[in-house]
Each structure stands twice: as C-alpha cells, then as structure tokens.
C-alpha cells in the first residue's frame, strides 16, 4: 500500500471535499442508526459520504445522501435503499447547539468521516463555514508551499 492511500484501521470513509469547501469550526461525534445489511456492507468497505450532509427535522438530526452499496449476499430478504436517510444519535444539548448554529448563525453541518469505535459506527460531524473561491485558492497555495518546503529540506539533508 502506498503512503498516500493509507488510512487509520478504524476509519470507514472520509469526506475530503468538506475540508476543501469549508472552514471547520467545531466537531462532534455522533452514532449512526443502521440496519443489519448496512453494517455488513460497511464492514466490506461499501460506504461513501462525499455528497452527504446533515438535516434537522423534529429536533432530530439525520444523515442525508450517504451512500451504502448493498452486498448481494446479505440483502436477499430485504429491499435495500442505498441512500436512505439515517438517524444520527446525539445528545439533546448537542442537537440544540447544532440546530441553533445552522438556523441562526448560517453555519453548515457536514459529515467529515465515519469510523468504527468498538463495534459501533460513529460519524464525525462538524459545524462549518463555507469558503469563498479565494480562500480555496489560498489553502491550495499554502499546501503546495509546505510541500515544496519539505522537499527542499529533504534535498538539503541528502
């Protein structure tokens, strides 16, 4: 496995697009309410959250747009919906804080990653502010500068 494609052992998937599109203000850990076939598919690595976002309804939080591709072997007796809305398990205070920030202050609530914690699937979600185009360019420029700087140091050490 190459250095670039490594991920932590417990990580299922991550949303790199969110870090590019938003300034991350605060992160929360939420549980996911899943069905049996979904857990089996996640264990097989069939989950993506790049297009997902969080919506609030009736004082509850839901993960909308996360895609779990069903396994043919485990979903024979149910009709799987790969992009169904999944409930996020959070404390009442956390939900109220997130809802207040999204509704009043104009924040966005986005999923950053999904990972295993013991035998449960957790989702790291964040309160975020959208970046403008010039902010995205500056971030890319800074990242390139850091990479070039590290390369320069390595060349001088050799």
Image (tube, rainbow, N blue to C red):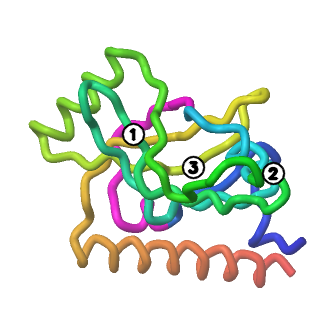
Q: CA distance from mark 1 to mark 2?
A: 24 Å
Picture coordinates of residue 56, whole percent (x, y): 27, 37
Q: Earlier in the sequence, mark 1 or mark 3?
A: 1
Q: Residue furthest right?
A: 1
Name the residue rendered at 81%, 56% in the picture: 44
52 vs 144, nearest the viewer: 52
Query: Nearer the observer, disc 1 or disc 2?
Result: 2
Side (left or right) of 45 relative to 59: right
Task: Using the image, tell me which numbered label, if any, was put on residue 83.
Answer: none
Q: Earlier in the sequence, mark 1 or mark 2?
A: 1
Q: Which residues are magenta?
A: 17-31
Position above or below: 36 against 106: above
Crowd band around label 3 with a 10 angstrom C-alpha radius: few (<14), some (14–19), many (20+): many
41 vs 25, nearest the viewer: 41
15 vs 38, nearest the viewer: 38
Task: Using the image, tell me which numbered label, if any, was put on residue 113.
Answer: 3
Picture coordinates of residue 140, whole percent (x, y): 43, 77
Q: Secondary structure at mark 2?
A: loop
Magenta part, dominant SS: strand
Name the residue rendered at 46%, 35% in the picture: 87
| Pointer 2 residue | 74
| Pointer 1 residue | 62
Position of the C terminus by quadrant: bottom right
């Amino acid at each position: 496995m190459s250095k670039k494609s490594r991920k932590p052992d417990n990580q299922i998937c991550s949303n790199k697009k969110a870090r590019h599109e938003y300034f991350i203000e605060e992160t929360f850990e939420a549980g996911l309410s899943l069905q049996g076939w979904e857990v089996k598919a996640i264990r097989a690595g069939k989950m993506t959250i790049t297009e997902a976002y969080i919506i609030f309804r009736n004082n509850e939080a839901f993960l909308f747009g996360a895609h779990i591709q069903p396994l043919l072997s485990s979903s024979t007796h149910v009709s799987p919906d790969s992009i169904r809305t999944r409930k996020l398990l959070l404390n009442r205070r956390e939900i109220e804080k997130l809802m207040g920030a999204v509704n009043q202050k104009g924040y966005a609530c986005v999923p950053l990653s999904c990972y295993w914690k013991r035998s449960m699937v957790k989702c790291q979600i964040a309160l975020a502010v959208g970046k403008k185009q010039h902010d995205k360019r500056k971030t890319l420029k800074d990242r390139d500068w850091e990479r070039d700087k590290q390369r320069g140091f390595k060349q001088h050490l050799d």
